[in-house]
Amino acid sequence: MTLKKIYNTSLTLLTDLYQLTMAYGYWKQGMAEQEAVFHLYFRKNPFKGGYTIAAGLEHAVEYLQQLRFQEEDLAYLGSLKGSRNEPLFEQGFLDYLRELHFTCDVDAIPEGTVVFPSEPLLRVRGPLLQAQLVETPLLTILNFQTLIATKASRIVEATKGDKVSEFGMRRAQGIDGALAATRAAYVGGVDATSNLLAGQLFGIPVSGTHAHSWVQAFESESAAFEAYGTAFPHDSVFLVDTYNTLEGVKHAIRVARKLQPSGFTFNGIRLDSGDLTYLSIEARKLLDEAGFTATNIVASNDLNEHIITSLKQEGAKIDVWGVGTQMVTAYDQPALGGVYKLAALRQEDGSWSYNIKLSEQLEKTSNPGVQQVRRYYDENGYIADMIFNEAEPLPENILVVNPLDSTHRKAIPAGTAYQDLLVPILAKGELVCQLPALKTIRAHRKAELNKLHESIKRLLNPHHYPAGLEANFLQFKTALVLELREKGEAAVTGK
C-alpha cells in the first residue's frame, strides 16, 4: 500500500472540478446509480514506436480501494461557491458523498503487457456517478506510468542486454514524478535506480557512484578515488571525467592497484561527458592492459534509445548505461494522451444503450459497447489483437479490421489460440485477484516483447502490429456514427 506510505492526506479530491459537478448533476437527475461502462485507452503509440507497455495498475487499484470522502474533503467542497456566491453543492449531495465508497467492477490489462492504440487498458463498470468520478485520477496514474515504462523499455531494448540504471530523480517532474517514473522504469526493464525512496517503497535495487563534487573536494583526483575506494572497497565506481577523462582513468587504475592488496575490488569507472565512443574504447584499452578486464565502464550524459543505438553501432565499449532525464521525463513526448470514454449505459428494461463520442477526426471517434481485447497467438508469438463488444455474440469467422484504414485487415483461422487481455481486478470494489510483484511484472514485460516480431520493436519506422476491431463490431460502429450524425444524438439502444 505505497500511496498510504507517501501521503498522510486523503487523495479523493485528486481530480478535476468537473468530475464533481457532473457527479452532482447525475445525483440531481436521479442517474447516480445507473449502470455505466467506461474504457481508458490511448490513441497512438508514444515516441513513434510500434508498441506500448501498460503500467500503473497497482497504484490505480490502491487509489480506488481507498476512495472515501473525508470530513475535510466535504468541508472544502461545501465551501465552494458558484457565480452567485451560493454554495456550489447542496448539503444532501455532500451527505451522499460521505457514505460513498467504490463499488464498481474493474477489468484491466495486467502491467507489463504490450498494448496498442484504442485497446482498453482498463474497463470500469458500475454506478455512473462513481465511474465518472474516477476518470481524472485513473488517467493521471496510468497515463504517466505507461508512458515511462514504454520509454524505459525502448532504452533497455536498445542496450541489447546490457545493464541499465535509472539516474533521473534530480530532473524528474517533482517528487511524485520521480517516484512514479522510477517504478515505471523498473516495469520497463531497468535493473536499478539511484532513487533511495523508490528503492525503499518498491523494493527496487539501488545503485550509484559519486559526483564531481567529491573529486573537487580533495587535493587531487587520485586522493579522491583513494578515499572513496577506502570507504567502499567492494562497491566503488570512480567518476573519471572531472578534469581529463583518460588521465582520470589512469589515476583510477593506479589507485586500484594501490588498494588491491587490502582486498579492494575495482568495480568500474563512469564516463559522464565527451565522445563516449572514443573515450570508452580508449578506457577499455587502458583497463585491459592493466589487468582490469572485469572492470565495468558505466556511461551517462543525457542518453536515450537513439544515442545508445548509435554508440553501440560505433563500437563503444560500455557495459552499464545510466539514463536519467530522457527516461523519467519522457523527454521527446511528455504525455501519452490517454482518454477515458463512456461506452454504454444500462436502460430500465435491462438493455444497453451504446454511447459514442463523435469527432471530425476519425481516430478521436470512440468505440461503443462493453469492450474486450482478444489476442491471438501461435508458437512463434502474437498474431493480432481484436477489440470486440462483449455484450454481443461473435461470428464464426473472425476478421480484424483497422478502423483507421479498412483495407488493413487480418483473417483469423478457426481454432487459433487466444487470450482475453482484460481480466477481473475488482468486483463491486473488492479485489478479486492477487496483484503481481514488481519483479514479476518486469519479467512479464520481457516475455511479452519476445513474442513480438522484431520489426515491431525497431526504433525507426516500426512495422504496424495487426490490431483493430472485429469486422461486425466495426460495421455496427460505422452505422451508429452515421445514425448519430443524422440525429445529433449520442446513444442508441442495443439488443
Image (cartoon, rainbow, N blue to C red):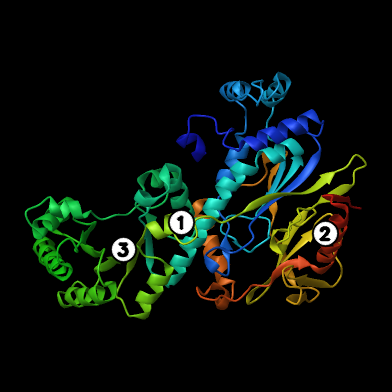
Residue that badge 1 annotates: 185
Among all residues in the image, which is located at the extreme bottom? 314
Secondary structure, mark 3, is loop
Secondary structure, mark 2, is helix
State the CA–CA distance, disc 1 to disc 2: 39 Å
Q: What is the crowding at mark 2: few (fewer than 14 residues within 10 Å), some, or many (at least 20)? A: many
Is label 3 or label 2 in front? 2
Q: What residue is drawn where x is 69% and y is 53%? A: 423
In this orientation, which residue lies closer to the viewer: 217 or 286?
Answer: 217
Residue that badge 3 annotates: 301
Q: What residue is drawn where x is 72% and y is 67%? A: 468
Residue 309 visible to an observer of this rendering = yes
Left/right placement of residue 142 relative to residue 221 reads right
Q: What residue is drawn where x is 46% and y is 56%? A: 185
Q: What is the crowding at mark 3: few (fewer than 14 residues within 10 Å), some, or many (at least 20)? A: some
Residue that badge 2 annotates: 481
